[in-house]
C-alpha cells in the first residue's frame, strides 16, 4: 500500500514537473517571441525613420533645385531685357547720329551757298565797303599821279561849297573802283557828285571822285593801309567842288 501511495505521489509530482516545465517553456517561447517582435518593431521604426529622412532630404534638394531653376530663369529674362534695351539704345544713338550728320550737312550747305552769294555780290559790285579788311591784299600798281600839296591853302572863294559831310576811310579790297581803275590814294567814293569831279577837303587837300559809296557816310576816302583807315575812323569834314 505504501509503495502504491509513493508511486502515485511520484507520478503526481512528475505530472506537476511536466506541467511546470511546459509552463516555463511556453513562457520562454512567449518571451522570445515578444523580444523578437520588439526587435523587429524597433528595426522597422528605424527603417521608417531613415526613409523619412531620405524623403525630407530629397524634398529639400528638390526645393533647392527648383529655386535655382527659377533664379536662372529670372536672370535669363533680365539678361534678355538688358540686351533688348541695349539694342534699342543703339538704334536711337544711330538715329540721332544720322540726324545730327544730316543737320550739319544742311548747315554746311547753307554756309557754302551764303559764301557763294557773298562772293558773287563782291565780284559783281564795285562799291567799296566801309568795313576795313584785316587781311592785306596786294593791290595793282597805282597810276602815277601828283598829289596836291596840302601845305598850300587854296582860295575857296572860287569853289562851290558842297557842305560839312560825314566821312569814313577804306583800304584795298581787291576790287576796282566804279570807274574801272584800281584804287589809289587821292581817290574818294561819293554819291553826291558825278564821277571825275575834283573836290577840295579842307585841311586834307585835293581829291577826285572815282568810286561810289554803299554805306551811311557821305564820303569815303581811300587810304593805303588798314591802320590808317582805322585811325581815321568817322569824321565831319568841309568839302568844296573845284570849278
Image (cartoon, rainbow, N blue to C red):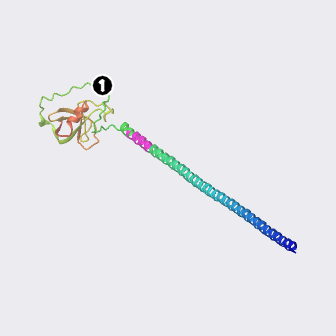
Q: Position of residue 153 (x, y in %)?
A: 11, 31
Residue drawn at (31%, 32%) of the image: 135
Residue drawn at (48%, 48%) of the image: 96
The one of 176 and 97 positioned closer to us in this rendering: 97
- Quarter of the rendering containing residue 61: bottom right
Residue bounds of the magenta highlight: 107-118
Q: Is residue 35 visible?
A: yes
Quadrant showing the C terminus: top left
Q: Which residue is mark 1?
A: 141
Please say if 20 is above or below 186.
Answer: below
Q: Position of residue 208 (x, y in %)?
A: 23, 33
Residue 162 sits inside the magenta stretch: no
- Report whether 67 appears left or right of 230: right
Residue drawn at (75%, 65%) of the image: 28
Residue 111 sits inside the magenta stretch: yes
- Report whether 158 appears left or right of 37: left
Please say if 27 is above or below 68.
Answer: below
The one of 166 and 153 positioned closer to us in this rendering: 166
Please say if 94 is above or below 134.
Answer: below
Quadrant showing the N terminus: bottom right
Amino acid at each position: 500500500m505504501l509503495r502504491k501511495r509513493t508511486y502515485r505521489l511520484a507520478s503526481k509530482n512528475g505530472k506537476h514537473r511536466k506541467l511546470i516545465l511546459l509552463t516555463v517553456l511556453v513562457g520562454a517561447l512567449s518571451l522570445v517571441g515578444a523580444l523578437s517582435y520588439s526587435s523587429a518593431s524597433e528595426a522597422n521604426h528605424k527603417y521608417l525613420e531613415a526613409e523619412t529622412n531620405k524623403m525630407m532630404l530629397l524634398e529639400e534638394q528638390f526645393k533647392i533645385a527648383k529655386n535655382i531653376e527659377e533664379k536662372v530663369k529670372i536672370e535669363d529674362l533680365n539678361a534678355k531685357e538688358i540686351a533688348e534695351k541695349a539694342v534699342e539704345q543703339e538704334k536711337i544713338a544711330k538715329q540721332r547720329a544720322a540726324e545730327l550728320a544730316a543737320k550739319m550737312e544742311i548747315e554746311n550747305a547753307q554756309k557754302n551757298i551764303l559764301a557763294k552769294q557773298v562772293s558773287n555780290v563782291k565780284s559783281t559790285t564795285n562799291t567799296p565797303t566801309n568795313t576795313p579788311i584785316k587781311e592785306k591784299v596786294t593791290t595793282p600798281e597805282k597810276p602815277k599821279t601828283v598829289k596836291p600839296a596840302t601845305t598850300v591853302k587854296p582860295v575857296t572863294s572860287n569853289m562851290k561849297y558842297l557842305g560839312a559831310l560825314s566821312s569814313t576811310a577804306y583800304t584795298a579790297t581787291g576790287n576796282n573802283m566804279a570807274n574801272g581803275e584800281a584804287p589809289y590814294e587821292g581817290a574818294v567814293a561819293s554819291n553826291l557828285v558825278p564821277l571825275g569831279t575834283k573836290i577840295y577837303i579842307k585841311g586834307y587837300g585835293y581829291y577826285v571822285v572815282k568810286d561810289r559809296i554803299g554805306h551811311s557816310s557821305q564820303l569815303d576816302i581811300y587810304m593805303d593801309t588798314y591802320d590808317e583807315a582805322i585811325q581815321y575812323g568817322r569824321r565831319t569834314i568841309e568839302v568844296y567842288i573845284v570849278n
